[in-house]
Amino acid sequence: MKTKVIYPSLILLSIFSVVSSCKKDVKTSSSSTTTSSLTTATLTADGAIALASVDTAGVKDSIYMVNCFPPNGNKPDSVAFSALPAAIGTYLTANYSGYTFTKAYKVDSAKVLVSYLVVIKYNGLFVGLKFTSTGTFVNVLEQKDGANMGGGGKGWHPGGPFCDRGGIQHDTIAIASVPAAVLTYFTTTYPTDTLLHAYKTPDTTYILISKDTVLYATNISATGTLIKRLKIEPHGGRNTEITAAKLLSAITTYLTATYPGYVFDKAYVESNQTGITGYHVFITVNNTNYEVGFDATGTFVKAVTIH
């Protein structure tokens, strides 16, 4: 996965709890947890905004939200949630159900408001989002740990919280390896579904991608309790798995711009008797899982936050 060039001006995210490695083949790895909120932001000499600290697998580090604003004199100022455009709250409620607001900033350039940066907690982890001055969603902010912030590195390292950016897909598991309690609940509750793919999130939720006329994403806890079930497509069609290399260039361009640092998980091309009708791409961004839908030409249609 290619990583964008980092601007000198950044937002630093810190977490006062242990965030374990996402790398499954490391013996000490376990699920990631976050137990406390951000501190008051401080503007550092280099233009970064420091919010907190992180202990990753016993090694102290920091988590940064990058590419927040270009180094051309733009200045971020803290702003209350009540001061944000209503469209931002509407977007967050629709796309991150159950989220907790953490922090927001307005970014001014030459005393003109140009954008908003909003940090939320979703499933216990931080998500940073950028919006226009009117509240229109722009992109999910990429995160990096401090060890990878300097001089053109990969943007991730094995054992770090974003080590899956190596394309190894540590979260993907064989369907046969899904715990019995999860499979039993799924097959009993949805007997007509055909399982296509399974992966495990840092908080040990199992996400099962299946088809019963249309595609579904079902989140089930390790003990076999339903968390939520989402319909991925509005109508039925034939879905064929494809690789990232087979995606239209328009799709790859959109994903790179909107979800910097994303990790490709799975993709399906939907078709009927007349030809291709759309694409469904499953990605992971900073430990948050999305399905991003496109039409037959590669034009964005809708994104669904799965977990």
Image: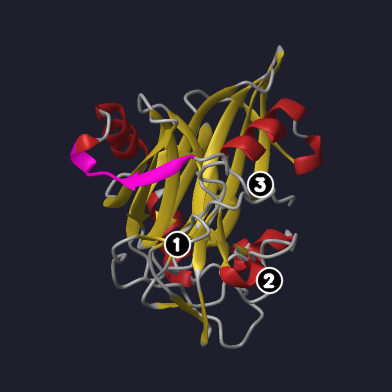
Of the numbered discs 3 and 1, the one sitting upstream in the chain is 1
Query: Label 2 sits on what residue type?
Result: His
Q: Is residue 75 magenta?
A: yes
Residue at point 49% right, 55% down?
A: 47
Residue, x 63% and y 64% (percent of image)? 149
Q: Is residue 259 left or right of residue 88?
A: right
Q: Residue 287: image x %, image y %? A: 51, 59
Residue 294 drawn in magenta: no
* Residue in the picture at 67% in, 40% down: 267
Q: Amino acid at mark 3?
A: Lys
Q: Position of residue 119 (x, y in %)?
A: 37, 50
Q: Residues within 10 Å of mark 1 (few under 14, many from 20)?
A: few
Q: Report x, y in % for residue 179.
A: 50, 71
Q: Is residue 55 above or below residue 303?
A: below
Q: Which residue is mark 2?
A: 157
Q: Give the mark nearer the N terminus: 2 vs 3.
A: 2
Q: 284 or 238, which is in the foreground?
A: 284
Q: Which residues are magenta?
A: 74-82
x and y, in percent, of residue 88 in the image: 32, 33
Q: Residue at x 57, y 47 (%)?
A: 67
**Residues tagged 1 and 2 counted as in contact (Cβ below 8 A):** no
Instruction: Residue under label 1, please give it.
Output: 44
Left/right of residue 136 with respect to residue 280 in the rendered view: left
Which residue is outermost to the left?
A: 82
Number of marks in the rendered image: 3
Residue at label 3? 266
Q: Report the Cα–Cα distance between label 1 and label 2.
A: 25 Å
Dot 1 or dot 2, earlier in sequence: 1
Under circle 1, the secondary element is: loop
Q: CA distance from mark 3 to mark 1?
A: 40 Å
